[in-house]
Image: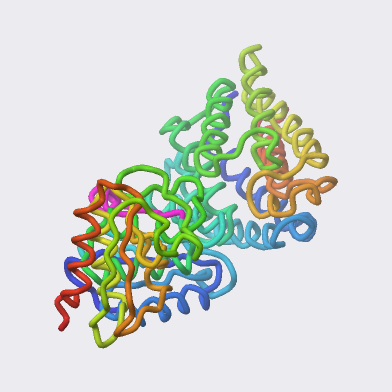
Amino acid sequence: MGLDITWAVDWVRRSAEVVAEHRVELIRLDRDIGDGDHGENLDRGFEAVIPKLDDLAAGSTPGDVLKMVAMTLISTVGGAAGPLYGTAYLKAAAAAGSDASLDGPAVARVLEAARDGIVARGKAEVGDKTMIDAWSPAVEAAAAAAEAGADATAVLAAAASAAASGAEATEPLVARKGRASYLGERSVGHRDPGAQSSALLLQAAADAASESTGA
Amino acid sequence: MPEVSGRVGVVFVSHSSKIAAGLVELAAQMAPSAALVAAGGTDDDRIGTSFDRVMSAIDEADSGAGVVVLCDLGSAILTAETALDFLDDELRSRVRIVDAPLVEGGVAAAVAAESGEDLESVVRAALSSASGGAPGVVNGAGEPQATLPGPADAGPGTSAGPVRTVTLVNDDGLHARPAAVLVKLASSFDQKVTVNGTDARSLLAIMSLGLTKGASLRIASDDPAAGDAVAAIADLVESGFGEV
């Protein structure tokens, strides 16, 4: 029932695919209100992650995969997404610990730790038009689902769905953090690229989960 | 970049490798022997910041006396903060990321480092370069730094406190080293003292007066209790800062 190393590796592969697929879209979103490098930076980061999957030692846990992703993104991304996602994956890895398999409540805790890592690093709050606007509803939905007894796959599905809505809901917001905040009111009407990529990554996690558990 | 033993190092983190390298070049003019290290651009020299470059720059700049890190835009700060998380506790305890203007703060920090100031003094030098009472800027006494007074404050007879007018005797004028010594002395007093109307605790403000040999310096304070401070600074100027 729980999500194991197979899921974690599949999530990473799907993340790389989805980021590559949406690279141009993310670049465009970021060009509208930022410096235009989000799609390219994230794509480079996940491209660097993929070969490292082959170097994982036998018996690696989901936590080990998350940690490897964290370190690779931190040292290859080069924009704000590097330290932000890097910290998220690092905190997620710590929350996952050395468990070989993650159940619903564990997945909810991992997501919460990731979100808290991003908040600690970027000091953004809900409503600032950042990736937190995708992560916070995702964490809340995951916690509620886990509380209601949902399994890991259903917890991730709930999180991914809430993240997508959260990303969409950044469009009318005025950016208060990051490069987009320099634009003030002119950032209204554009979706935040970090929130969008967060939603894509969480959807990839949910897809990998439903694949691995056959749900 | 040679490691300078016992001096605080300064790291410039910029999205642009040219900006970071240019800042080192600029600051080195006034601080030729300080450990100034550039961490600009990504690993392949694109626009962005590199975790690895920041890590190795901090390592290179540290000689045991600590490192002051200045950053340009938001994600440079995020990268620097992330790098800090990965340093061992001992090194991390003597690294400070300073939210100060990159150019002015960097030059002020470099000059303070060159003068052998300790870590917290170099941090203060960087912060004091932010004029206009920016939030988070504090002086040595922990009080909000006053806005740099304009020329209107420089007129004679406007202050009720002690005043002394002295002549600058140094051949090279009030260049980086004596300016740093003056600012350090002024910062050691509780009372605010001005030199020709400019806050004596702000290195950049003092240096930007552009005082040359023979210039007249009006050391003054509005605070009647600043007699000792004014006398000490005036004596220092008259003594030629030990250079003559």
The answer to whether residue B60 is seen in the rendering is no
**Depicted A145 relative to depicted B145: above or below:** above
The answer to whether residue B70 is seen in the rendering is yes
Total labels drawn: 0
Write the start and end of the magenta stretch as one range.
Answer: B87-99
**Depicted B165 relative to depicted A213: above or below:** below
Q: Position of residue A117 (x, y in %)?
A: 51, 38
Left or right of A153? Residue B219 is: left
Q: Position of residue B175 (x, y in %)?
A: 31, 79
Q: Residue at x 46, y 58 (%)?
A: B148
**Depicted B125 relative to depicted B138: above or below:** below
Q: Nearer the viewer, residue B177 or A145?
A: B177
> Residue B70, located in which quarter of the rendered image?
bottom left
**Depicted B58 relative to depicted B217: above or below:** above
Q: Position of residue A82 (x, y in %)?
A: 55, 54
Q: Position of residue B158 (x, y in %)?
A: 42, 57
Residue at the extreme top: A148
Left or right of B68? Residue A151 is: right
Q: Nearer the viewer, residue B45 or A48?
A: B45
Quarter of the image that includes the N terminus of chain A: top right
